[in-house]
Image (cartoon, rainbow, N blue to C red):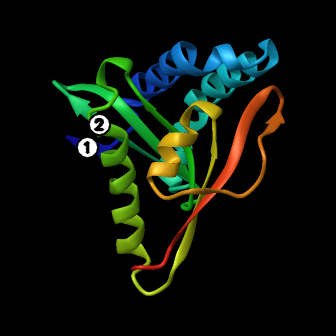
Amino acid sequence: MIKKIDNTDLEAAVNLANQVFSEFIADGYSEEGRQTFTNYLDFKLEEMNEDLESGHKILWGFYEDGRIVGVIGTRDEFHISLMFVDKDYHHRGIARALFETVLTELKRQHPAAPFVLTVNSSPYAVAVYHRFGFVDIAEEQENNGIRFIPMKLTVSDC
């Protein structure tokens, strides 16, 4: 089941993101990058309730047996800010289902106009985003130790 995450499940969603980051992404980052990501999640946990209430950020969770096993987040409506799936649930279509939920919601909110969805993908997730139709718009970059590839998806079949 997919549903929007509220403040009751926020800590579980952040913990999942941190766990998956540690298992799959952190090894490709410098110590600075690992610390930047951890600090970001800790900071976000503190301020996220306000962001969720204002609509600045939206988080969707994939729940299995009442537990979050996948999460996707958007900020400023058209930017995917995070997407993580528990390692025991990889290759089950959870990331795609979460992405399709975001896409469906954006199409519902913007039925008359094409829009561009962006993401700064970790090197680990580039292939996933390519399967979703995203294209690279720049070479790999690094900011505060966080490695990412800027990508976009133009959605015109609204």
- What amino acid type should be assigned to the residue bearing mark 2? Phe
Disc 2 designates what residue?
62
Name the residue: 67% across, 28% down.
40
**Is residue 8 among the parts visible in the rendering?**
no
Name the residue: 79% across, 16% down.
30
Task: Decide: few, some or many residues near mark 1? Use Cα within 10 Å; few <14, some 14-19, many ≥20.
Answer: some
Residue 55 location in percent, x, y? Answer: 50, 56
Disc 1 designates what residue?
2
Residue 46 location in percent, x, y? Answer: 59, 28
Residue 107 location in percent, x, y? Answer: 39, 72
Which label's residue is closer to the chain start, 1 or 2? 1
- What amino acid type should be assigned to the residue bearing mark 1? Ile
Q: Nearer the viewer, residue 106 or 97?
A: 97
Q: Nearer the viewer, residue 137 or 33?
A: 137
Compute the Cα span from label 1 to label 2.
Answer: 5 Å
In the rendered structure, the answer to whether residue 156 lies left or right of residue 69 reads: right
Identify the element where label 2 is drawn.
Answer: strand
Q: Is residue 86 above or below residue 102?
A: above
